[in-house]
């Protein structure tokens, strides 16, 4: 974990250095007073693109359907990062500005589709874990997105110039994105509750990232509609939430890649109980082996976990428990691909011998 945190900090430092180039190589932006927006937009995009790289590099030993979930998520995040390369949302959500045509297809579609695809990626993830949830329904989620967009477009707002279709398209897309970000947050939160401990940390970062994504869209709507003339918007400081999204997505992507490298790290002189508990830690959905682990808990409650305290019958029970977990991992685990050989490579010698006696 320390190595992961150090790598995260290093990535942030590199991103900051690259983003700071906006202050030196774009004098026109400095003259126009948008250099802060350019730097933040560039940093947002860099962190999100780096997150995509981590997400995609983590799929190596995942099963095909989970790989598809990651690819959908990555495409959605790419579309969202593309928007920041404009260089920032400030440029095309500011209806007063005529320097950019706000109805441009290439601006509206990526933003509207990005959050939708990220939601679909997490929905696929949830369905693989058999997570049954109201917000897994595409129909209900779409209706929610349309309702939020309608509320934002039709709500009372200051007398901004050029209202009409441009306003509806831009802020409707922002509201749609916010709605699907909220739904993705809720689905991801539900996944975090049931997923294996080895993935919980990464999934918690995803929960935070989707919360930030929803906040960034609602924040953009509020400040650009109701506080357009404020210094907060004028100085481009209002785009900071998009950088927060990138940072959190980056940390989540790194967490998933790290979790994908998972191996059973046996403690010194690992006992039979250690073997079973560590193997169970690889199961994507822990509740699938709860009944098996109940037998282990009964043994540890009665005699502890040291091999010397266990009877031959209890050791046999633990070996059977391991075989049940091993079968689940190699044949039924919905997310990760395991092999019997890979699982047994680092098992303690005495446990391997006990397995061989089982045939």
Image: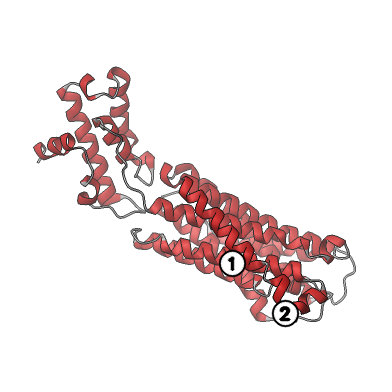
Q: Hey, which quadrant is residue 106 in on the image?
A: bottom right
Q: Position of residue 121 (x, y in %)?
A: 49, 61
Number of disc labels: 2
Q: Position of residue 65 (x, y in %)?
A: 38, 61
Q: Are marks 2 and 1 in contact (CB under 8 Å)?
A: no
Is residue 336 rendered to the left or right of residue 345?
right
Is residue 254 rendered to the left or right of residue 286?
right
**Mark 2 vs mark 1, CA separation in Å:** 25 Å
- Towards the viewer: 139 or 244: 244
Is residue 160 rendered to the left or right of residue 319?
right
Residue at image mark 2: 103
Is residue 116 rendered to the left or right of residue 95?
left
Residue at (34% x, 41% y) in the render: 288
- Towards the viewer: 25 or 186: 25
Q: Quadrant of the C terminus?
A: top left
Residue at image mark 1: 46
Is 140 placed above or below 287 here? below
SS label for mark 1 = helix
Residue at (27% x, 36% y) in the render: 275
In the rendered structure, which disc, 2 or 1, sits on the residue that comes first in sequence?
1
Q: Position of residue 56 (x, y in %)?
A: 44, 64
């Amino acid at each position: 974990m320390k190595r992961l945190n150090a790598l995260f900090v290093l990535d942030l430092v590199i991103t900051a250095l690259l983003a700071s180039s906006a202050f030196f190589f774009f004098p026109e932006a400095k003259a126009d007073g948008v250099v802060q927006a350019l730097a933040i937009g560039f940093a947002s995009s860099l962190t999100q693109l780096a997150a995509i790289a981590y997400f995609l590099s983590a799929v190596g030993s995942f099963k095909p359907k989970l790989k598809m979930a990651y690819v959908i998520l990555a495409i959605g995040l790419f579309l969202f990062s593309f928007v920041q390369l404009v260089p920032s949302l400030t440029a095309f959500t500011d209806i007063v500005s005529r320097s950019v045509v706000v109805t441009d297809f290439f601006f509206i579609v990526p933003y509207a589709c990005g959050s939708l695809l990220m939601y679909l990626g997490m929905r696929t993830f949830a369905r693989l874990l058999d997570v049954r949830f109201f917000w897994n329904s595409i129909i209900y989620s779409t209706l929610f997105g349309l309702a939020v967009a309608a509320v934002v477009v039709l709500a009372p707002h200051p007398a901004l110039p050029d209202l009409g279709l441009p306003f509806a398209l831009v802020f409707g897309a922002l509201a749609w994105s916010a709605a699907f970000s909220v739904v993705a947050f809720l689905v991801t939160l539900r996944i975090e509750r049931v997923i294996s401990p080895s993935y919980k940390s990464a999934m918690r970062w995803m929960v935070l990232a989707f919360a930030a994504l929803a906040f960034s869209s609602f924040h953009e709507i509020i400040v650009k509609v109701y506080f357009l003339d404020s210094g907060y918007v004028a100085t481009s400081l209002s785009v900071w939430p998009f950088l927060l999204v990138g940072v959190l997505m980056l940390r989540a992507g790194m967490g998933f890649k790290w979790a994908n490298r998972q191996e059973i790290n046996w403690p010194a002189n690992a006992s039979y109980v250690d073997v079973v508990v560590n193997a169970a830690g690889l199961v994507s959905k822990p509740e699938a082996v709860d009944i098996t682990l109940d037998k282990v808990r009964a043994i540890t409650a009665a005699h502890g976990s040291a091999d010397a305290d266990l009877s031959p019958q209890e050791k046999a029970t633990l070996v059977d428990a391991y075989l049940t977990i091993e079968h689940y991992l190699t044949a039924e685990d919905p997310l990760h691909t395991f092999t019997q050989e890979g699982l047994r490579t680092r098992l303690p010698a005495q446990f391997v011998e006990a397995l061989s006696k089982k045939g």
